[in-house]
Image: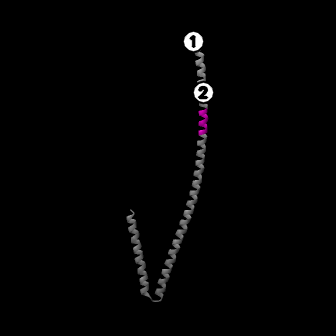
Amino acid sequence: MSDKTNLPNKKNHNDELVKIFLNNQSKELEHKAQEISLMAQKDSNNFEFSKLALDRQNEDLEKQRLHNYKSKKARYFFATVVILLVCALLIYSLATNKDDFAFEILKTIVLLGAGGGAGYGFRAYQNK
């Protein structure tokens, strides 16, 4: 008879355990749902940050291209002015019959060009 009285107790105890288990499972599912929503929000925030970073990078690259263009334009302008001045000096020295001075200018130009070319070649050889 003691066995029969214990059986309903075990059933009530098992029912309570099942209720506790189901309650814990529902809480765990709620936490998982919150975790998933937080992960979705994190992904959304990362996406927005990435878009902003790409926009800023695009702006920086545009500014860099503009700067490179202006820099190259200034170098070409300077080189053109120097070449024109040297040509004008050569023409003036030849017009005033100062052939020796014109020859010295040409010799200097050739020596500077050869030295620059040799230095460029040497550096290119060392960088290999």
Magenta span covers which residues?
27-35
Near-viewer residue (92 or 72): 72
Left or right: where 115 falls relative to 3: left
Q: Is residue 97 above or below residue 83?
A: below
Return the residue found at the far bottom: 97
Counting every numbered tag in the picture gives 2
Of the residues under marks 1 and 2, which one precedes in the sequence?
1
* Residue 103 magenta-highlighted: no
| Image quadrant where one finds the N terminus | top right
| Image quadrant where one finds the C terminus | bottom left
Task: Kindly identify which residue carries mark 2.
Answer: 20
Disc 1 residue type (three-letter): Ser
Task: Kindly identify which residue carries mark 1.
Answer: 2
Element type where label 1 sits in the image: helix
Q: Position of residue 111 (x, y in %)?
A: 40, 77
Q: Position of residue 112 (x, y in %)?
A: 42, 76
Q: How is the image coloured?
A: one colour
Q: Residue at position x 59%, y 39% from top? A: 35
Near-viewer residue (80 or 29): 29
Q: Is residue 22 above or below residue 116?
A: above
Q: Residue at position x 58%, y 15% from top? A: 6
